[in-house]
């Protein structure tokens, strides 16, 4: 059972299907699929407002870092990635993610297939390919950035696109956000996560002094998200 399923019960059928679909994208996204896809996919599938907010965040964040072009949307790239994979177009077939992203831009999608896929599926697929693209661009080991999306998901007021761009672009972001939210990090691990975030913020940003509070707020919101999903399931 996946990580999120272990917390609030069995993964939704939609989430399970999505994880299977993401597996078709190949080895470049394998750590995202096995590590965090069921968690993110379930939240986005169950909570529409969270999906909408994360989509807006991802568009601004990724456009600012050059992963997406100014007129591109993460949901559209996710749909392209899923359809292109059906024809053998996956990241591992290219020398780098820039080439892969260009291939997706030139791929002609089937609009009827796109209509049958949910926003949650498209968005999670988009995040699945954007994550290793960020890791390659800023020289992170594969999988390090898998859980970064949980920060804007749980505290969007603090973890804005601009702040997250600064944090990730340092190349020093460290720590498992999911484990932090689940209170599974050691004291040393918590310090590592907090320090990597603070170090990524500009000296002029007063938020550098309130990272720990921001993380605590994120943890509280995470508990609320889990409660909402659990309530939905118990109510059928």
Image (cartoon, rainbow, N blue to C red):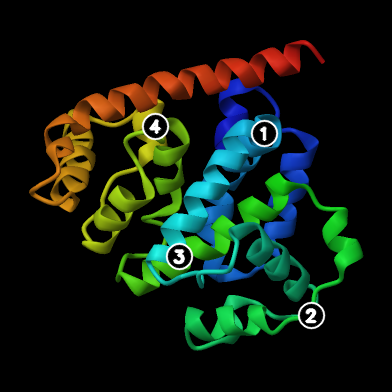
- For marks 3 and 4, give the one nearer the viewer: 3
Residue count near mark 3 (Cα–Cα under 10 Å), binned few <14, some 14–19, many ≥20: some
The x and y percentages for residue 204 are 9, 47
Q: Which residue is mark 4?
A: 155
Task: Calculate the distance from the C-alpha at mark 3 to the C-alpha at mark 4.
Answer: 20 Å
Which mark sits nearer the N-terminus, 3 or 2? 3
List the residue tagged with mark 2: 108
Counting residues from the start of the chain, the first of labels 2 and 4 encountered is 2
Residue found 61% across the figure and 41% down from its top: 52
Determine which of the numbered discs, if any, sits on residue 63 in the image: 3
Quadrant position of residue 61: bottom left
- Secondary structure under the numbered disc 4 in the rendered image: loop
Asked if residue 15 can be seen in this view, the reply is: yes
Between 183 and 54, the one lying in front of the other is 54
Give the Cα separation between the discs numbered 3 and 1.
22 Å
- Quadrant placement of the N terminus: top right
Q: Secondary structure at mark 1?
A: helix
Q: Earlier in the sequence, mark 3 or mark 1?
A: 1
- In the rendered structure, the answer to whether residue 10 lies left or right of residue 154 reads right
């Amino acid at each position: 059972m996946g990580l999120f399923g272990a917390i609030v019960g069995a993964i939704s059928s939609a989430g399970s299907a999505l994880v299977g679909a993401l597996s078709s994208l190949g080895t470049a996204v394998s750590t995202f699929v096995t590590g965090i896809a069921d968690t993110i996919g379930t939240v986005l599938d169950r909570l529409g407002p969270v999906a909408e907010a994360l989509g807006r965040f991802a568009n601004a964040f990724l456009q600012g870092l050059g992963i997406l072009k100014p007129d591109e949307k993460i949901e559209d790239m996710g749909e392209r990635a899923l359809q292109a994979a059906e024809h053998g177009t996956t990241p591992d077939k290219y020398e780098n993610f820039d080439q892969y992203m260009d291939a997706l831009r030139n791929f002609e999608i089937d609009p009827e297939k796109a209509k049958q896929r949910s926003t949650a599926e498209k968005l999670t697929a988009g995040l699945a390919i954007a994550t290793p693209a960020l890791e390659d661009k800023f020289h992170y080991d594969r999988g390090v950035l898998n859980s970064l999306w949980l920060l804007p998901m749980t505290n969007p007021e603090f973890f804005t696109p601009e702040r997250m761009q600064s944090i990730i672009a340092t190349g020093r972001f460290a720590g498992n956000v999911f484990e932090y939210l689940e209170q599974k990090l050691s004291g040393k691990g918590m310090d590592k996560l907090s320090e990597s975030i603070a170090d990524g913020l500009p000296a002029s940003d007063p938020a550098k002094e309130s990272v720990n509070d921001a993380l605590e707020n994120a943890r509280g919101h995470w508990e609320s998200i889990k409660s909402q999903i659990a309530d939905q399931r118990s109510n059928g």
